[in-house]
Every structure is written in C-alpha cells, then in structure tokens.
Amino acid sequence: MWHGVALYLGAVIGAGVLILPGASASLAGPASVLAWGFDSLLGLPIALTFAALAARHPDAGGVATYTGIAFGPTVGMVIGWFYVLAAASAQSLVALTGAYYAAPHLGLDRLGVALLATAMLVVATLTNSRGLRVSGQVQLVFSAAVTVLLVLAIVVSGPRMEAERWEPFAPEGWPAVGNAAVLIFFAYFGWEAICHLSAEFRDPARDVVRSTLISVVIITVLFLGIAVATIGTGTYGTEELDRTAVARLLADPLGTGVGAVAAGIAVLIALGTANAFLAATSRLTYALARDGMFPSRLGRVNADGVPLPAVLAVGGFAISCLVLATAFGWDAKDILVVPNALVITVYAAGTAAGVVLLRGARRVAAVIASLLCLALLPFAGIGLLATVLIAAAALLYRRRHPGPVRAPSV
C-alpha cells in the first residue's frame, strides 16, 4: 500500500506545482486558492474511480482500455490519441520550468531559457533512444525532493503571511477562478498512472483504493499549503515571481543560497520528469501503434528493443511545441491550453466509463467525477477546439486504416 502511495506522489507531484501557484494567483488573485481546492477535491473522485476501474480491470492500457470496454474500441483509440498528445506537448512546460528556475542564477535571457529547456528535451530524447531511463526509484527521489521543498516553503512562509494580501479576494472576477482551475489542472496530471500499475499490486481491490485515499490527502495538503503561502506572502504578480514562486518563498526568509539550491533541484526534477514523461509516452505511443491506433511505423523497435521511432516522434513533438512557445512568446497559460483540455476530456471519458462499468458506491464516485470534469470543460476555452480537431484526425485515421483495433497492453 505504501509503495502505491509513493507511486502516486511520484506521478502527481512534479514540475506543475513549482510553476503554477504564482501563475494562478496572477490570473485570479487570492480567489485562485478556490481553484486549487476544487482541483484537489476533484482529484478524490477521479482517483477513486480510476482505482476502482484498475482493481476491476487490471490492464496496462489504463484509461484507453476502460473507455474502449465501455464505449467501443474507436472511442478508446481517440482517448489514446488525446493522452499521448497531451503528455507530449506538456513536456515542453516541464523543461521550461527547470529553465525558468535556473535563469536568475545563470543570467539567462529569454533565448537562453529556451535553449536550456531545449537541451533538456534533447538529452531526454537521446537517453531514451539508447534505452536509458530514469528508474522508478530515482523518480520517487525527485518527487520526495519536491515534497521537502514544498513543506519547507510552507513552514518558513508562515510568519511572513499578511491578512491584507487576501483583499480584494477576487479582483479578476469569479470566471477567472474557473480559468485558474483549468490552468492548474496540469499540476494534478497523474491520477491515472495507477491504472497502468494496478496489476502489480498483490491485492488491487484493497491496496489501490487505500493508496489513493492517502495520496489524495497528502497532495491536497501540500498543494493548498503552497497556494496559501504564495498568496499570503504576495509572491506573485511579475513574470519572474510567477515562474519561480517556490524558490522565492524559500530565498526571501532563508537567503539566496537556499533559493539557488531550490533552483538546482528544480532543474534536476525537470530533467528527470522530462525523461520519465518521454519514456512513458513513447512506450504508450508504441503500444497504440502496435495495436492499430497509431501509424504502424511507430510500433517498431530496434535491435535493442527500444521503440526508437516512437521515442523520436514524441521527443520531436515536444521540442516543436517548445520552439513554437518561444517564437510566439507563450507563457504557462498559453502552453497548457491544449494539453489541459485534452486531459480533462480524457478524465471525463474515463470517469464516464466508470459510470458504465462500476456499481454501487464506486459508481457514485464515477458520476461525481464525470460531472465535475464536465463542469470544468467550458473553462478550457479554445483548447476545446484543439480537442475536436484531434478527435477528427483520429477518426479520419481510423477510417483510412479500418483494421482491427485492440486494447493497448504496454
């Protein structure tokens, strides 16, 4: 069970919580804490639904498998496309997070930040192309480091919080809270990760659910705590503060040396997360291609058993997104428009599959999760258009390649 908790924390706690507290506060003001609270509460029924589905249908295909069982293989294929493209594009922000934290200490300008982030993605692509990956244990160490940073930032920020920082509470209006909830959804990516590992539990029906409940509580406390600390100390409002809020929360009371250490850890975490993201996404891409959901050329492996075409495709896509973000001057809000819309849609479809496949209290949790995801979707804005276009592309591919589609088994 505790290994399951560690896996959950490793999947969810990462680059998102390092960059989004400041950005969300700038977007919605102190009321952004409500967005963090909403997404944390939403995580509970989502995680419980996926845990229940994983216990009932332990399969490495995860959400694509569940939606395929509930609504047919074509829907499962579309969800697979959504998941892969969301994960691949989100990697650009993961790399940028590390570069943003390094920039003040290395004296990097905008181009320097982009080059450092690109270098991280290139390293991740090259290591994966040679079959080298960050191990699960190392990834857990990275997530533990983020957890320690968050706890320390919350503790040292306590004496510096001021009540007047909370007024006005919603300076940008209440719709901005919904927009912030969509923005920070990236920080909660990972609730579905347990689905791919469910078959590894000795007793999935018991331990997956227990791991889920404990993990949701820990993540909620940490994320709400850092959001409150960011708002209460006023550590937001400028581009640099928004991008490096956690480091500044530590540096202001403890000194720039601690901030530099936090920045160094952020760089390592970003590099490790990008490596792990690319490893997982490329292997899912390979599996989807092998099972008829993606072009067959992506379902090949080299002599060393590495899915090289998938690795290069995912890495190249992430780098392309980074180049576009740099060329157009996009920040986190712009970069996350598409991946957040895709993942919210994936979660809505996955929990809807839970409504069909589950019974009793678990079905109630699935209904709640599905309705809350649907309530969040309208705030995704133009990202919904990208979702429609990607779904159309997936269906067009299916029409032109009408062979059998199998549920993925990674």
Image (tube, helix red, strand yellow):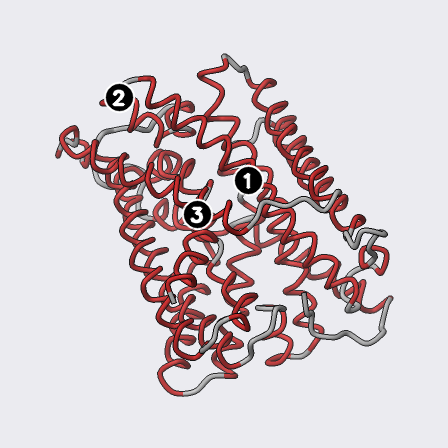
Give the amino acid at mark 1: Gly
Outermost bottom residue = 360
Circle 1: element type: helix
For mark 2, what is the residue?
Answer: 252
For mark 3, what is the residue?
Answer: 187
Give the amino acid at mark 2: Asp
Cα separation, mark 3 vs mark 1, equals 16 Å
Give the amino acid at mark 3: Ala
CB contact under 8 Å: marks 3 and 2: no
For mark 1, what is the residue?
Answer: 272
CB contact under 8 Å: marks 3 and 1: no
Give percent across and percent down for residue 2: 37, 62
Of 340 and 3, the residue lying toward us? 3
Cα separation, mark 2 vs mark 1, equals 27 Å
Please identify the quarter of the rendering in which residue 71 is found: bottom right
Q: Residues within 10 Å of mark 1 (few under 14, many from 20)?
A: many
Q: Nearer the viewer, mark 3 or mark 1?
A: 1
